[in-house]
Amino acid sequence: MKKLLLLIPIFLLAFTSQYTPDLNNFLQPIKCDKVLHKTAFDICYSCKYKHPLVVAYILKGDLVKKKISRKGLTFRPDYNLPAKCKSYSKDYSRTGFDRGHLASNASFDYNRKIQKETFLMSNIAPQKPNLNRRYWAKVEKFTRYLAVKYKQVEIVTGVCGNKGHIKNKVGIPAWWYKIIYIPELNKTVAFLAPNTNTGMSKAKLKEYRVTLEEIKRVCNF
């Protein structure tokens, strides 16, 4: 995987990439308290909200359908984070929110080690169940479809805004977004969905398709 570059201003880390210029320009304004490099994806993490702001990775179509079982995988704290920044699986219990993956397990079910890394809490943010299990599942499935069809795609998944907190002061994102760059077409496809149950069970994929400019406007980048 292409490595992400770090630009270090006075206080925070800037999350930039060597991906397509459009994605790089999109990522530059996003500041991270910690940048975590995992085996196949990179995380821009917020200690303030105790969840990732952005995860970036490359998805290769020839690896998509390997289907290693997720049986036995459990959510675990990321010990590469300082204690004050960590979230825990128990923080989500009985809150009305799912543990939402930014780098999805199904994207990396060809490798057990990477699967385990997707279950680190540094890759998780609060997500309403109908969004997570219905509409966002459609977005993830479409992402894998594009990877297979066009051999490779570059992915940025992020959250923005804040609707309060669950346990342990873990922030609740107001929005979830996904940006898919298709190198073969030199084309970007993007989605931005509110973090809500309302309407998500029956929402069609195109309903929350947006431009990069719309994501920037809503997320105030």
Image (spheres, rainbow, N blue to C red):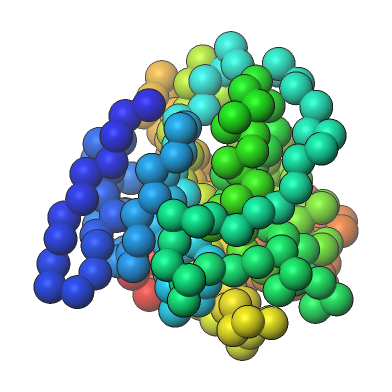
Q: Give percent across and percent down for residue 49.
A: 50, 76
Spot the residue most to the bottom: 164
Q: How many marks?
A: 0
> Is 111 positioned to the left or the right of 22 in the image?
right
Examine the rendering and report whether any part of residue 36 can be seen: yes
Residue 145 visible to an observer of this rendering: no
Q: Position of residue 178 (x, y in %)?
A: 54, 50
Q: Quadrant of the C terminus?
A: bottom left
Residue at 16% across, 55% down? 7
Residue 21: % across, % down: 24, 40
- Residue at 53%, 68% (x, y): give it: 86
Name the quadrant of the N terminus: top left
Q: Is residue 67 above or below residue 215?
A: above
Residue located 50% across and 56% down the image: 79
Q: In the image, residue 123 lies at what x, y percent? A: 56, 53
When the figure is inspected, residue 190 is found, relative to residue 143, above or below; the finding is below
Going 34% across and 67% down the picture, which residue do you hit?
Answer: 33
Above or below 166: residue 216? above
Foreground residue among 92 and 86: 86
Residue 104 in the image: above or below residue 165: above
